């Protein structure tokens, strides 16, 4: 059994009332992690500590901040095995998925490190005689970061890396489904040379989570909030932040379409669909939920897709032959099975898969999915690919946009100009041409539109999100005032 203490002021500490909660291994059903369960007072103390550290960290020169973040990247890679152990037991992900998490997290930290000298402003001509005007970007204060369980190292790292690069301090509210994974990141950040209390990690029981998050959002020192998770919870976070007039960055749910036009390379499209729909059991915000395909090539595509997917079975992630691990909980597996059964009852063809055994769901392809089925609109967040046949590219665009979500998308065509035209018409924050819907690079402006949220992580967009833009003037001549 693993343990996860609160990480406050660079020290592992128990909750003030000694309360704990357990995270159960979704596969073995044994206790994976026993974590300290913070009280509201514990969480507010963490915010106070972060506020105390802010003056020192915000004044740290950019090259020193860069060195700290690069050291953090080295530590994440050095502790990849520890992260893998925690991720497998807490989330049911595979070892390969854990290693990928660590590699991308290290890249996110290195990219943030490179941005420490890119937090720039500009001079702006002033109409006032003798005035020199500047627009400058400065750290905003304490950032509340709310990270999910599904890509726990990547998304927790993303939630803190750019805020730190910009000179802010952080309170990371860990997911109750991956407390050890998130806690380990906090422990490593305390070893990077930052001032004490720059990064603090708060765990909470599932029951106390909403109260603690609300209290943290309301804390006067918290100046920014970023949240990655479900649209349902994202709406609540946005409302709470709005009550305090605090900007937030929300990266929420998705229903990514992979559009296959009639001139597409079908083998390449199948490769992308396999990866996009089934990688990490479909539990990625960018997962391919819908394959919107021209009916002229649909039969051939489905046959190729079935041949690739049918042999794969979900299994214990500790098995060396495992390609697909478990769902995060058996409840999540039951929900996915319910969406599959609803579609079949309403006329969809089960091409392959559809089996749920405990916490496992096998790769599933459903053909003929229509708006009458829950699966058409609802995010499955499971290993399920819906085939939706269309007559032409205009209908493909219409179907791709027939969703409240707009995070990621993809278009396959041998005519790149045609594909680009389609991509520009799709309502999503991200679109890839002749590539999978799942793709992440730290320097890119990552985020969605519609119910997939607002704001962007990554690169200069991330700098904009986690700094204050200020207007500062220097009067060089004698001003004239009317009174």
Image: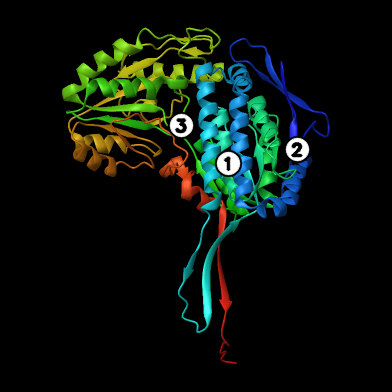
Check contact, mark 2 vs mark 3: CB within 8 A.
no
- Which mark is nearer the camera, 2 or 3? 2
Q: Is residue 455 in view from this perspective?
A: no
Quadrant of residue 449 within the rendered picture: top left
Residue 407, image x and y in percent?
41, 38
Read off the residue under disc 3: 285
Looking at the image, residue 292 lies above or below residue 222: above
Looking at the image, residue 234 lies above or below residue 354: below
**Left of 61 or right of it: where is 354?**
left
Task: Say which of 388 and 182 sits in front.
Answer: 182
Q: Earlier in the sequence, mark 3 or mark 1?
A: 1
Check contact, mark 2 vs mark 1: CB within 8 A.
no
**Left of 168 or right of it: where is 9?**
right
Residue 49, image x and y in percent?
76, 46
Check contact, mark 3 vs mark 1: CB within 8 A.
no
Residue 123, image x and y in percent?
48, 69
- Which mark is nearer the camera, 3 or 1? 1
Crowd rating for badge 1 (residues with CA inside 10 Å; few <14, some 14–19, many 20+) = many
Read off the residue under disc 1: 161
Task: Say which of 278 and 417 sits in front.
Answer: 417
Q: Secondary structure beneath disc 3? A: loop
**Left of 118 or right of it: where is 376?**
left
Read off the residue under disc 2: 10
Residue 174, image x and y in percent?
65, 33
Q: Quadrant of the C terminus?
A: bottom right
x 42%, y 31%: residue: 286
Crowd rating for badge 3 (residues with CA inside 10 Å; few <14, some 14–19, many 20+) = many
Q: Secondary structure beneath disc 2? A: loop
């Amino acid at each position: 059994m693993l343990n996860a203490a609160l990480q406050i002021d660079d020290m592992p500490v128990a909750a003030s009332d000694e309360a704990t909660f357990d995270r159960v291994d979704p596969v073995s059903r044994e206790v994976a992690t026993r974590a300290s369960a913070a009280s509201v007072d514990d969480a507010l103390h963490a915010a106070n500590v972060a506020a105390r550290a802010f003056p020192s960290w915000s004044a740290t020169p950019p090259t020193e901040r860069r060195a700290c973040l690069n050291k953090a990247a080295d530590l994440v890679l050095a502790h990849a095995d520890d992260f893998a152990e925690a991720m497998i037991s807490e989330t049911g992900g595979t070892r390969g998925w854990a290693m990928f998490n660590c590699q991308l997290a290290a890249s996110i930290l290195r990219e943030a490190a490179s941005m420490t000298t890119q937090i720039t402003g500009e001079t702006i001509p002033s109409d006032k005689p003798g005035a020199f005007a500047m627009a400058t970007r400065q750290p905003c204060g304490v950032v509340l970061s709310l990270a999910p369980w599904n890509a726990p190292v990547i998304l927790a790292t993303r939630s803190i890396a750019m805020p730190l690069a910009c000179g802010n301090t952080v309170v990371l509210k860990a997911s109750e489904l991956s407390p050890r994974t998130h806690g380990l990141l906090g422990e490593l950040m305390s070893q990077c040379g930052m001032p004490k209390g720059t990064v603090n990690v708060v765990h909470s029981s599932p029951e106390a989570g909403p109260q603690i998050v609300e209290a943290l959002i309301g804390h006067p020192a918290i100046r920014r909030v970023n949240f990655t998770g479900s649209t349902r919870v994202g709406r609540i976070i946005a409302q709470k932040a709005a009550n305090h007039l605090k900007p937030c960055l929300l990266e929420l749910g998705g229903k990514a379409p992979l559009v296959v036009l009639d001139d597409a390379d079908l083998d390449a499209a199948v490769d992308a669909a396999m990866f996009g729909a089934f990688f990490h059991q479909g539990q990625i915000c960018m997962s391919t939920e819908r394959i919107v395909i021209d009916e002229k090539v649909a039969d051939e595509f489905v046959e190729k897709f079935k041949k690739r997917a049918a042999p794969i079975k979900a299994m214990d992630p500790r098995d060396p032959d495992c390609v697909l691990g478990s769902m995060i909980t058996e409840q999540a597996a039951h929900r996915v099975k319910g969406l599959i059964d609803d579609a079949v009852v309403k006329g969809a063809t089960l091409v392959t898969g559809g089996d749920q055994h405990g916490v496992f769901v096998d790769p599933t392809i459903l053909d003929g999915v229509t708006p009458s089925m829950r699966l058409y609109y609802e995010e499955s967040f499971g290993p399920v690919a819906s085939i939706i046949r269309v007559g032409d590219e205009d209908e493909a665009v219409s179907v791709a946009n027939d969703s409240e979500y707009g995070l990621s998308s993809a278009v396959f065509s041998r005519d790149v100009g045609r594909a680009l035209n389609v991509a520009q018409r799709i309502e999503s924050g991200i679109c890839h041409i002749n590539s999978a819907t799942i793709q992440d690079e730290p320097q890119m402006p990552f985020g969605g539109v519609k119910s997939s949220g607002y704001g962007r992580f990554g690169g200069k967009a991330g700098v904009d999100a986690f700094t204050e833009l200020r207007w500062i003037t220097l009067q060089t001549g004698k001003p004239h005032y009317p009174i």
